[in-house]
Structures are given as C-alpha cells and as structure tokens.
Image (cartoon, rainbow, N blue to C red):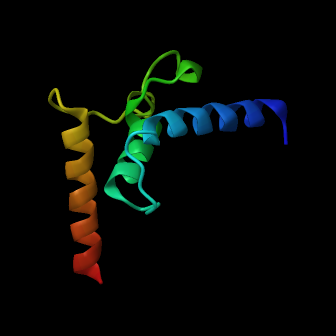
C-alpha cells in the first residue's frame, strides 16, 4: 500500500476512534456511525481541498445555515424516491 494511502487510513481510523469513544455502538449501520461518515465525507473541511468541504468543492449548493439538516433532508428525499420506484 502506498505510504500516502496508509497515512490517510491511519488518520481516518484515529479520528473515528476518538469520535466513537464515548458513543460506542456495535451496530456498524447505526445512525450515529452513518452520521459520522456523512460528516467526514461531506461536511468536514479537508486540507487536501484547501480547507474547503467536499460539498463546496463539488459545487453542491447548500441553502441555509444548517448543512446537516440539508444533507439529511436530501438523503431522506432520495431514499423515499428510491422506495417509491421499487
């Protein structure tokens, strides 16, 4: 494994362990764990993106002050639309 990828994985694992420390759950799909992944992958500023969030870097516009509420609302709408098509 390339060193840069290994460093990234170790940094992610450390951050996840610190996050999960006080909120332990054995369910890998719990809302708490899934929320962490949403935060890490969309809301958290990344140094490799010049301290921008992945959402901003992708050009996704989030209206309002509450990024979490918007992301969760969009995910909920997408889930409902997918279920309606099934």
Q: Nearer the viewer, residue 60 or 29?
A: 29
Residue shown at the point (42%, 29%) measured from the top left: 44
Q: Position of residue 31 (x, y in %)?
A: 32, 55
Q: Nearer the viewer, residue 22 or 73?
A: 22
Q: Is residue 22 left or right of residue 85?
A: right
Residue 26's place in the image compared with 33, above or below, is: below
Query: Which quadrant: the C terminus?
Result: bottom left
Residue 76, quarter of picture: bottom left
Q: Position of residue 55 (x, y in %)?
A: 39, 34
Q: Is residue 15 left or right of residue 30?
A: right
Residue shown at the point (19%, 50%) measured from the top left: 73
Q: Residue furthest left?
A: 64
Q: Position of residue 46 (x, y in %)?
A: 51, 24
Residue 23's place in the image compared with 5, above or below, is: below
Residue shown at the point (21%, 41%) measured from the top left: 70
Query: Which quadrant: the N terminus?
Result: top right
Residue 80, quarter of picture: bottom left
Residue shown at the point (37%, 33%) measured from the top left: 43
Q: Position of residue 51 (x, y in %)?
A: 48, 16
Q: Residue furthest top?
A: 50
Residue 10's place in the image compared with 75, above or below, is: above
Q: Residue furthest bottom?
A: 86
Residue 28's place in the image compared with 39, above or below, is: below
């Amino acid at each position: 494994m390339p060193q840069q990828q290994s460093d990234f994985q170790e940094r992610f694992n450390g951050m996840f362990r610190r996050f999960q420390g006080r909120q332990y759950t054995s369910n890998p799909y719990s809302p708490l764990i899934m929320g962490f992944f949403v935060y890490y992958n969309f809301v958290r500023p990344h140094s490799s993106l010049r301290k921008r969030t992945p959402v901003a870097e992708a050009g996704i516009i989030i209206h309002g002050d509450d990024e979490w509420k918007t992301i969760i609302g969009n995910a909920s709408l997408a889930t409902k639309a997918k279920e309606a098509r099934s």
